[in-house]
Amino acid sequence: MSNRMWGGRFATGPDAIMEEINASIGFDQKLWRQDIRASLAHAAMLGRTGILTSEDVQAITDGLKAVEAEIESGGFTFSRALEDIHMNVESRLRELIGPAAGRLHTARSRNDQVATDMRLWVRDTADLIDQQIADVQLALAGKAAEHAGSVMPGFTHLQSAQPVTFGHHLLAYVEMLARDRGRFADARRRMNECPLGAAALAGTSFPIDRHATAAALGFSRPTANSLDSVSDRDFALEMLSAASITAMHLSRFAEEIVLWTTPQFGFVRLSDKFTTGSSIMPQKRNPDAAELVRGKAGRVFGALQGLLTMMKGLPLTYSKDMQEDKEGVFDALQTLSLCLAAIGGMVRDMEPDTKAMRKAAGLGYATATDLADWLVRVLKMPFRDAHHVTGKLVGLASSRNVGLEKLSLEEMQAVEPAITEEVFAVLGVERSVKSRTSHGGTAPALVRREAARWLKSLRKEAAAD
Ligand code: ARG
């Protein structure tokens, strides 16, 4: 049997393989809410403009709501022969209300329909992701406030560099996530135009009101060019770019959790809620959730790469290749959503071992820069010379296998006679972090203020939602 939706000129139905490669219902059924929402808006507009009678519109509206209830309750049977979500819904509508169902597709095409459904889905999901990012920020800022003064090693090249505070480190991620939210918000603003009514590609001869459908679906305006409307997927690409950058940030944090929870670092502990055991090594506590956040970033990046590659050769306007936009977009955004939930959970769960962090902060001559700065400040030495003197002192301490503070004044004076007793005050890690008071620095007072500022604005935003 030929397809009832488009089979007028076809004598027979498709080959089984044709059906298998062509059907998208296996994955695009995810769009059912958006598809019905857009159809309801379209039908209402067709009524208001007099293109359909109010009786037809009423029947279509009631029918679509009945289909929606069926899908919602799990009582709907999706059919592969009907290819995709659009035809599955319309076919069921016809079973429920009869021939009036056939009028719903007046002045539209599956091309503008799927573009609209995808935008709605991406927008809905991006809104959820935005809230989740804000929630992770809130968790990080809360921990940062608690640990504004907890000293830990700061690293460059993963080598001890200078002491910082744990709160400062966590707030670095709050900043990254703020930019991530900005990227999602920018992409949302740009994508918030409604393609519905572009029809197959050229627009329609019916007197439709595209502004009405755009407004009904929460879009800022209708898209301006019908060809662009059905062939553009850069809204999805932008969201995937934003998602990729966010996933990369989460992955870096996940990597740090993996490092920090090793016995060798021992900076933080995750409870049983976010660790797993090994089936052979009874002592193991594995940070699987963090590893998976790190690992899943690859899928998100892959979706971006996949969609870019799929789109790059397509002439205007729609080609069926574009049906391949869906699985990657669905998977990437849902993966990111899961990763955000996992990171939020781990941040709230993690208990830093402040003693271990403090101890590690003093290793690796982390206060060498403080010593050099002291030589500049107090002895008025040029920084390059101070760097050299400090290097000699570090070499001396290192050959003895002791910290800088363990050198005697005489030993120091043998390298630089002008050094006085005062120097020992800057060799402590607490003093070091306290002195970093430049804008954006790690001094506990600044970190406390920054954490409070973030908490205030995030809590205010959460209360307004
Ligand atoms: N399932 C299709 C997709 O996802 C819907 C659009 C089909 N359009 C067409 N001209 N065959 O892209």
Image (cartoon, rainbow, N blue to C red):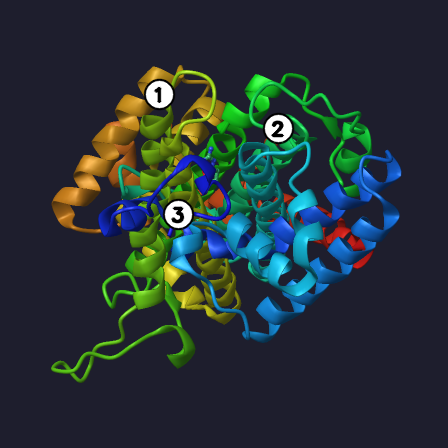
Identified at 32% across, 59% down, the residue is: 292
Compared to residue 244, the image places residue 88 above or below, namely: below
Residue 97 rendering spot, x and y as whole percentages: 69, 61
Q: Amino acid at mark 3?
A: Ser
Which residue is labeled 1 in the image?
Answer: 312
| Residue that lies at the very extreme toward the front in this rendered image | 11
Amino acid on which the number 1 mark rests in the picture: Lys
Dot 2, crowdedness within 10 Å: few (<14), some or many (≥20)?
Answer: many
Q: Say few, some or many: other residues with alpha carbon within 10 Å of mark 1 (under 14 / 14 to 19 / 20 or more).
A: few
Check disc 2 and report the residue beneath it.
199
Mark 1 or mark 3, earlier in chain: 3
Q: Residue at the location (24% across, 39% down)? A: 411
Q: Nearer the viewer, mark 2 or mark 3?
A: 3
SS at circle 1: loop
- Sequence-first disc among 2 and 3: 3
Q: Is residue 86 above or below residue 211?
A: below
Residue 362 visible, this angle: no
Tell me the tag on residue 158.
none
Asked if disc 3 is less than 8 Å from ligand 1, the answer is no
* Disc nearest the viewer among 2 and 1: 2
Q: Is residue 99 left or right of residue 207?
A: left
Residue 335, quarter of the rendered image: bottom left
Q: CA distance from mark 1 to mark 3?
A: 33 Å
Q: Horizontal and vertical percent for residue 465?
A: 78, 55
Answer whether residue 41 is visible to the viewer in this image: yes
Q: Amino acid at mark 2?
A: Ala
Dot label at residue 2: 3
Which circle's residue, 2 or 1, is located before the other in the chain? 2
Queried on whether the Cβ of the residue with tag 1 lies below 8 angstroms from ligand 1, the answer reads no
